[in-house]
Amino acid sequence: MIAANNVIATQCAARGRTCIRRVVRTPARWDRIVALAKTFGTTLPAAPDPHALSAFLTARRVADPQRFPDLSLSVIKLLGPGEYVVETPGAPTTGHFGLAIDDYTHGTAPNRRYADLLVQRLIKAMLSGAPAPYSDSDLARLASHCTEQEDNARRAARLVHKQSAAVMLAPKVGTTFDAIVTGVTDHGTFARVLAPPVEGRVMNANGALDVGDRVRVRLVHTDPEKGFIDFATNGR
């Protein structure tokens, strides 16, 4: 899949065709990724380096496959979400930092993603020598729409998951769990319980935690209707 999407993107560029790209930008919190790697005895470059990150993650997957998903989740959260953008021939490419490649698109699943359908239509026109079915401005609007709808779908899925989890955890208020911090934002600090794998807000973090930290948390409240799951650090 990765190879196919890479070829699609490079072929569009080689033939002078505008294409929708799937990009993951250079992470703003690379310093935290460096700090996480250091806890495993690995020194990553001070400047963001996707190849060094890939080598580190590959080594950790081999060294500790049982705990690797927790590390992988932390890194994914720090990398940030992907997005769809339009890149015209000759323009600098943004690239996909998570995959460590410069040219990437989504064109292999037109049956489940609208962006892939758009790319398939662009490929069909390119191979037949026909004009592109969309103008650059239309593609830019559609790429932005695809990103927005992906975000909406992710939020909806997250809400349903958290509502279900809140119902399941309601009888366990007061129970203490092992967890890993998955997010630190202006809206609060969030942690994912390892068993069962659900995420909630740490109500008393007070800036003392960061992504990737392992903590013991106590379940203090759930609200199934709103999908709220509230934790407190153990002992508080």
Image (cartoon, helix red, strand yellow):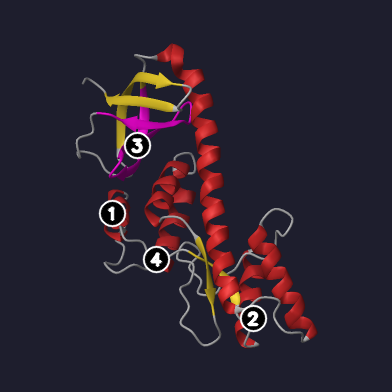
32 lies above or below 211: below
Q: Which residues are magenta?
A: 177-203
CA distance for labels 2 and 4: 28 Å
Residue 30: where, in percent of width, then height? 31, 60
Outermost residue, top side: 171
Q: Secondary structure at mark 4?
A: helix
Position in image of residue 151 (x %, y %): 51, 50
Residue 170: image x %, image y %? 45, 15
Q: CA distance from mark 1 to mark 2?
A: 36 Å
Q: Residues within 10 Å of mark 1 (few under 14, many from 20)?
A: some
In the rendered image, which quarter is residue 156 located in? top right
What whole-number distance in Å separates the C-alpha atoms at marks 3 and 4?
27 Å
- Name the residue rendered at 44%, 48% in the picture: 72
Magenta segment: does it hold 185?
yes
Residue 172 versus residue 147 in the image, above or below: above
Between discs 3 and 2, the one toward the N terminus: 2
Please name the predominant secondary structure of the magenta segment in the image: strand
Q: Which amino acid, mark 2?
A: Cys
Question: Which quadrant is home to the N terminus?
Answer: bottom right
Which residue sits at x=30%, y=40%? 187
In front: 40, or 92?
A: 92
Q: Secondary structure at mark 2?
A: helix
In-front residue for pair 43/145: 145
Callout in the foreground (1, 2): 2
Amino acid type assigned to the residue bearing label 1 in the image: Arg
Residue at mark 1 to residue at mark 3: CA–CA distance: 16 Å
